[in-house]
Amino acid sequence: MLLAAHQILGTTLFFMGAVAAAHAHLYQGITHYHASNTTPLSFMYGVDFGRVCLSRAAWVLGIGISDRHGGAATRQSPGTADGGTP
């Protein structure tokens, strides 16, 4: 059940914008994931929580990378910070 809890909390935090906290919970979920042991949970809840953790963690890493590169591209260059020309 820790796997399900970390997946649910990590997904919720991701959609709330708390990317670092989401990554921490999704990673904890991944550490609890054993594909051979999740079959009963998959049938009971209709979802493989470990695979969801893996896919959401990929989203989190993708968002983190795009924020780092995208944010740099949208900032003003140092020469235009005062409103003048570079």
Image: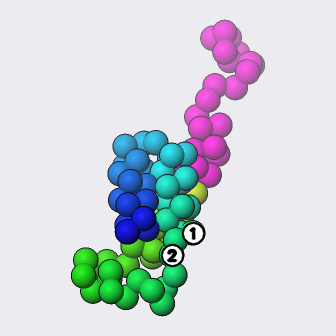
Question: In the drawing, does residue 38 fall left or right of residue 61?
Answer: left
Identify which residue is drawn at 62% across, 52% down: 65
Query: Residue 38's x, y, as percent?
Result: 41, 83
Mark 2 lies on a secondary structure that is: loop
Residue 63 disc label: none
Q: Is residue 14 magenta?
A: no
In the image, which residues are magenta? 63-86
Residue 31 disc label: 1
Identify which residue is drawn at 70% across, 26% down: 77
Identify which residue is drawn at 66% across, 15% down: 81
Check disc 1: other Cα within 10 Å, few if <14, some if 14-19, many if 20+: few
Foreground of the two, 34 or 83 = 34
Query: Residue 21's x, y, as percent?
Result: 51, 46
Check disc 2: other Cα within 10 Å, few if <14, some if 14-19, many if 20+: many
- Asked if 71 appears above or below 85 in the picture, the reply is below
Q: Main secondary structure of the magenta part?
A: helix
- Asked if 13 appears above or below 3 in the picture, the reply is above
Q: CA distance from mark 1 to mark 2?
A: 6 Å
Residue under numbered circle 2: 33
Q: Quadrant of residue 71 in the image?
A: top right
Identify which residue is drawn at 48% across, 90% down: 36
* Residue 10 is at least partly visible in this image: yes
Foreground of the two, 73 or 52 = 52
Query: Residue 67's x, y, as percent?
Result: 57, 44
Q: Are marks 1 and 2 in contact (CB under 8 Å)?
A: yes
Mark 1 lies on a secondary structure that is: helix
Query: Residue 29's x, y, as percent?
Result: 49, 65
